[in-house]
Image (cartoon, grey):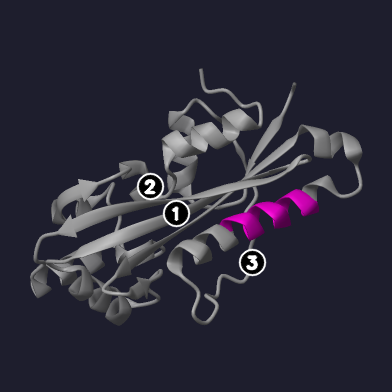
Amino acid sequence: MDTTLILASGSPRRVELLKQLGLQPQIRPADIDESCHRGERPQDYVERLAIAKAETVFARLAGSSAAVKTDLIVLGADTTVVCNDQVLGKPQDRAEALAMLQILSGSTHRVFTGTAIVTASGVESLVVATEVDFVSIPETVAESYWQSGEPLGKAGGYAIQGKAACFVKEIRGSYSNVVGLPLRETAELLGSAGVNIF
């Protein structure tokens, strides 16, 4: 079956991860409201957003064409960081980024990524959690890290695949999940939709 794989995200990190699997997705960001609902658990939040992103783009592209729907696979994902029961999204400015780094400093946090695929057959989704231990981050180092530009647009205000790798003391679980897409689990989801990596 000839299929078209669409990534419902503009994240260059997710694109690179999919390319690591030998895939060349088309990029179609969903542009949806990403607000967290009151009392919503982080794992429910990322799964809901992953599904919403994929469903939004699938509906937009498929329209009323049954042929298009048959060939279309849309992948959605969302990642968030949780530390001491605080959800750390993407920092909007320097003050927010530095505050996040202070919370993460010397602590253990969890990274949740919701991943979903939408096809003509329906929706499949899952959530993967990874635990990350950070060393203590001096204020001067946090400031220097902010100046690097990496914290912007990253859940938790850091990029593990960048300079923030220096902050990691230990990681338990999927590394690619922290980057933004758990590859083993994503490959399984795609395999169930007929996209085989091997």
Q: Main secondary structure of the magenta part?
A: helix
Q: Position of residue 4 (x, y in %)?
A: 70, 33
Instruction: Name the residue beneath numbered marker 3.
Output: 32
Q: Amino acid at mark 1?
A: Thr
What's the mark number on residue 113?
Answer: 1
- Residues rendered magenta in the picture: 50-60
Q: Is 51 in the magenta?
A: yes
Q: Is residue 150 visible?
A: no
Residue at mark 2 to residue at mark 1: CA–CA distance:
6 Å
Q: Quadrant of the N terminus?
A: top right
Q: Earlier in the sequence, mark 3 or mark 2?
A: 3
The residue lying toward the viewer, choosing from 53 and 45, is 45
The residue lying toward the viewer, choosing from 59 and 192, is 192
Mark toward the viewer: 3 or 1: 1
Instruction: Name the residue beneath numbered marker 2.
Output: 177
Residue at mark 3 to residue at mark 2: CA–CA distance:
22 Å
Label 1 element class: strand
Q: Earlier in the sequence, mark 2 or mark 1?
A: 1
Marks 2 & 1, CB-CB < 8 Å contact = yes
